[in-house]
Amino acid sequence: MAGRLIVWAGALLILSACGLAKEDGMAGENSSEEMSKDADVITVEVRIESDGDSANRFEADINAKKNPESVYLESIEVPFSEKFMIPKDVFIPLTSTRVEAEAVEGASWISCTILYDGEVVATHKSRGNGAKAVCEKKIRLGPG
């Protein structure tokens, strides 16, 4: 009896080390399904920051093959962030992203940032009167 218990404990230890057994007793299928769901989209995030409390003339253009999106707002509170989910079910699902905003009167700077799946792909900071931040990321095939 003690020998069988040791064999079972050893087998469980080996399987858990390989990732085949989990604490809840289920195989690792759910975690891989959840990961594949996340991998089916590109998460595009646009951010606007400033030393003012708001920004004017916010524009964001997400040029996706399926369901392109644009957002135009006369005024936003900063810091501002918005996310867009782009499905990866077509060849080159995302061709470009562009975002811009203007600093309000009294602000000395404004910046924009574009992130794809959490990675910064474009950033710009503008200073002075009438400062305007413009970020753009284009996807290009081939050289230059």
Image (tube, helix red, strand yellow):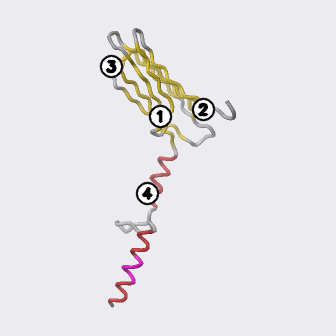
The residue most toward the right is 143
In the image, 5: left or right of 140? left
Give the number of the disc on residue 51: 3
Q: Quadrant of residue 78?
A: top left
Q: Are marks 3 and 2 in contact (CB under 8 Å)?
A: no
Q: Earlier in the sequence, mark 4 or mark 2?
A: 4
In the image, 32: left or right of 140? left
Q: Are marks 4 and 1 in contact (CB under 8 Å)?
A: no
For label 2, the residue is 139
Q: Quadrant of residue 22?
A: bottom left
Question: Which element is circle 4 on?
Answer: helix
For label 4, the residue is 31
Q: Which residues are magenta?
A: 7-11
Question: Which element is circle 1 on?
Answer: strand
Task: Work out how far the residue at label 4 is from the one at label 1, CA to CA, in angstroms.
Answer: 26 Å
Secondary structure mostly seen in the magenta stretch: helix
Position of residue 26 measured from the top left corner of the image (x, y, whole percent): 40, 66
Position of residue 82 measured from the top left corner of the image (x, y, whole percent): 41, 30
Q: Earlier in the sequence, mark 2 or mark 1?
A: 1
Q: Earlier in the sequence, mark 3 or mark 1?
A: 3
Question: Which element is circle 3 on?
Answer: loop
Q: Earlier in the sequence, mark 4 or mark 1?
A: 4
Question: The residue under label 4 is which amino acid type?
Answer: Ser
Task: Work out how far the residue at label 2 is from the one at label 1, CA to CA, in angstroms.
Answer: 14 Å
The residue most toward the bottom is 1
